[in-house]
Image (cartoon, grey):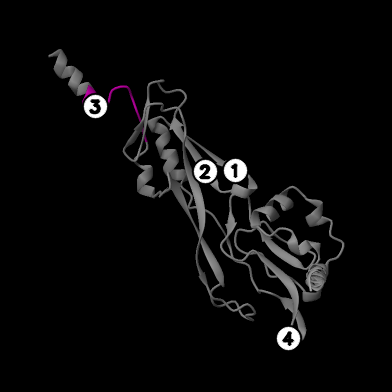
């Protein structure tokens, strides 16, 4: 009995091929695409041609790349697909067709560069970065300007940090929502995607960050207005 189960499992794996186990996560595809991985570009069995042209590139995508019996939308580094990023060619109801007829757009957090640039006049310095492919979301390192006094205090959302030149992270986080139902084999472009829809938001210390929160970033000098007033009163 065990031998029969093993042979049956082996037959399934062989029919799917080794490529069915590659690039199960979107970040793996991004890494392979931008680093020109031979596993992605060196496939000689282009079985996806049986289904014809793949779905068009979605909004914000770098490319739609195909290998074996799969095609996928490649989002830029720092972006994620809102929902569906990969389709495969399959035989269904007597014909070859794609498992889905479109990709979902590439998304990221709202652009807050303009709001942060306004802080440059307040001795605030920010630097944008993008992590590894597994954590390729955008982030900002915020701190007091290097040219400012060494005793500057960084204040964010009313919380003060005496070492103002030690950066604090503002991160972009994309989370999946509840699962929704969708028609796998729609012939039209209307209707919602099936699966889990992602949304991206800026996060600071596990709390959502809003545009109004950006206005709370300050670099305070050694004496705040309150302390200066206190010193003047003592001198009198």
* Residue 15 picture quarter: bottom right
Judging by the rendered image, the residue that carries numbered circle 2 is: 139
Q: How far apart are labels 1 and 2 at the CA level?
A: 8 Å
| Residues at discs 1 and 2 in contact (Cβ within 8 Å) | yes
Which numbered marker is on residue 225?
Answer: 3
* Residue 153 picture quarter: top left
**Spot occupied by residue 196 in the image (x, y as percentages of width and height):** 54, 66
Q: Earlier in the sequence, mark 3 or mark 2?
A: 2
- The label nearer to you, 3 versus 2, is 2
**For the view shown, which residue lies furthest in the bottom direction?**
94
Judging by the rendered image, the residue that carries numbered circle 1 is: 131
**Spot occupied by residue 2 in the image (x, y as percentages of width and height):** 78, 70
| Residues at discs 3 and 4 in contact (Cβ within 8 Å) | no
Q: Earlier in the sequence, mark 3 or mark 4?
A: 4
Judging by the rendered image, the residue that carries numbered circle 4 is: 93
Apparent side of residue 150 relative to residue 175 in the rendered image (left or right)? left
């Amino acid at each position: 009995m065990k031998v029969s189960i093993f042979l049956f499992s082996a037959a399934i794996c062989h029919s799917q091929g080794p490529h069915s186990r590659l690039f199960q996560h979107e970040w793996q595809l991004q890494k392979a695409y931008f680093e020109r991985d031979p596993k992605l570009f060196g496939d000689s069995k282009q079985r996806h041609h049986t289904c014809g042209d793949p779905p068009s590139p979605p909004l914000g995508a770098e490319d739609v790349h195909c290998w074996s019996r799969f095609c996928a939308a490649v989002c830029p580094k720092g972006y994620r697909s809102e929902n569906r990023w990969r389709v495969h060619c399959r035989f269904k109801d007597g014909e070859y067709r794609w498992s889905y007829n479109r990709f979902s757009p590439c998304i990221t957090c709202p652009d807050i560069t303009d709001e942060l640039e306004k802080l440059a006049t307040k001795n605030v310095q920010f630097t944008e970065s993008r992590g590894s492919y597994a954590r390729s979301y955008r982030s900002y390192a915020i701190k007091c300007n290097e040219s400012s006094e060494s005793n500057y205090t960084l204040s964010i959302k009313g919380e003060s940090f005496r070492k103002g030149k030690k950066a604090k992270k503002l991160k972009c986080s994309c989370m999946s929502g509840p699962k929704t139902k969708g028609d796998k084999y729609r012939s039209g472009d209307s209707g919602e995607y099936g699966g889990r829809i992602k949304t991206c938001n800026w996060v600071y210390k596990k709390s959502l960050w809003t545009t109004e929160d950006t206005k709370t970033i300050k670099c305070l000098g050694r004496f705040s207005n309150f302390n200066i007033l206190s010193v003047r009163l003592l001198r009198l």
